[in-house]
Image: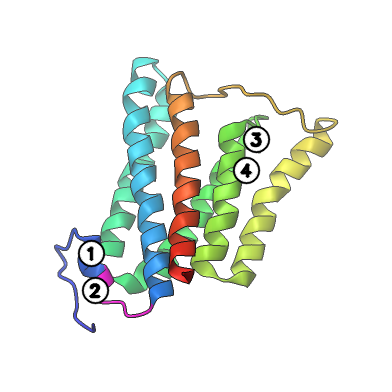
Amino acid sequence: MNQKVSYLNLSLRKLLLTEPDSFNKARIKILYTILIFSIAKILIVIPIIYQEGQVFQLERALIMLVIYIGLCKALLIQKSYSLSIAHIMASFGLVIIWSGLLVQTINIILLQFVFMLILSSFYLLNRVYGMVYSVMAILPVILFSIEGNGLQFHFKRGEIAAPAFEILVVLNFITIVIIHYLYHSAIS
């Protein structure tokens, strides 16, 4: 159980063999799932935003792709990095959520990010960080609703072209379901 994984490790299974605690295994699986789905979403979106000529979105997607791949590799190398990676992912989530407020857009994808951040911060970190990240994630939605005379939610694409927007919505819902499943499987 105390075996170490190689620097070249690409296997989640090998990493999980080094962790005896089922809750920590669940946390690692949740974090890995979030990273893999994030990478998949970016890889799906890149060709679409490239084709649409959305240069800012393309640059942001490429930067995030490199970061997420690096975080995924770091997790597979050393499970002790999982807390730091969870904080980094939560911080990126907050940047995405708050940037939605800056561009005056609250859409379904942004709300999904709020839900994923709330779930992830409680499941991956602890109650204190869960509350801190949750308040920071909800605050822009509250500010937007106060500023805009109430929250008028529309199913609009915002800055992402179709069909990337629709694909992201579906994959975000799948991610939320899988996060719940993995966490509650550990409890069982």
Residues at badges 2 and 1 in contact (C-beta under 8 Å)? yes
Tell me the mark number nearer the camera, choosing from 4 and 1.
1
Tell me the mark number nearer the camera, choosing from 2 and 3.
2
Magenta residues, dominant SS class: loop
Q: Residues within 10 Å of mark 3 (few under 14, many from 20)?
A: few
| Residue identified by numbered label 3 | 102
Instruction: Please determine whether, in this image, residue 114 is positioned above or below residue 51.
Output: below
In x, y percent, where is residue 56? 44, 27
Q: Earlier in the sequence, mark 4 or mark 1?
A: 1
Q: CA distance from mark 2 to mark 1?
A: 6 Å
| Residue identified by numbered label 2 | 17
Examine the rendering and report whether any part of residue 122 can be seen.
yes
Q: Residues within 10 Å of mark 1 (few under 14, many from 20)?
A: few
Q: Which amino acid is tagged 1?
A: Arg
| Residue identified by numbered label 4 | 98
In x, y percent, where is residue 114? 60, 46
In the foreground, 144 or 115: 115
